[in-house]
Image (tube, rainbow, N blue to C red):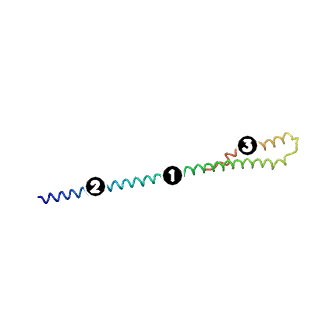
Amino acid sequence: MPETHAKLAENARKIKLAFVFLTLLFVFLLSSYGLLYHEKSQRVEQQLTDRKKFAQENRARINDIQKARVFSCVSTYEAIRQVFAPFFPDKPWSKEEKRVVHRFNSQINTLKKHCPSQVRSKR
């Protein structure tokens, strides 16, 4: 019986050591995972910040391009008016000529007014 008691005590000591070892291993693995997770989360946050900055820069570029497109559209219609101006009849205009010139100018003005919607990007 004393043998059995000694074996049980030795086994209990081995079990305690194994439990302490496994507990320390668990704490080590958990803290390592926490450090890795923290580093990864910082990288992800940096990537999100970079993407937001990139998106803002792209929006600014798109807005600049759209402004340039509208300006180009207006300039084109104004150039059409200048190209056709020499073909208008000399003044004084008759009632019919005034109507035609007025219609032409109002058509150009209408087209210029619609330039922002004409150059809108299609998404």
Asked if the residue under mark 2 is in contact with the one under mark 3, i.e. CB atoms within 8 Å, the reply is: no
Q: Mark 3 points at which residue?
A: 110
Q: Using the image as rendered, state which of residue 9 and residue 93 is in the foreground.
A: 9
The quarter of the displayed image where residue 5 is located: bottom left
Mark 3: give few (<14), some (14-19) or many (20+) Cα within 10 Å.
few
Asked whether, in this view, residue 70 is left or right of residue 39, the answer is: right
Q: Name the residue under label 2.
A: 20
Residue 46, numbered circle: 1
Tell which tag, 3 or 1, sits nearer the viewer: 1
Measured as percent of width and height from the top left, residue 79 is found at: 78, 49
* Mark closest to the chain's N terminus, 3 or 2: 2
Amino acid type of disc 3? Thr
Q: Using the image as rendered, state which of residue 3 and residue 81 is in the foreground.
A: 3
Tell which tag, 3 or 2, sits nearer the viewer: 2
Query: Does 8 appear above or below 115?
Result: below
Q: Distance between the residues labelled 1 and 2?
A: 39 Å
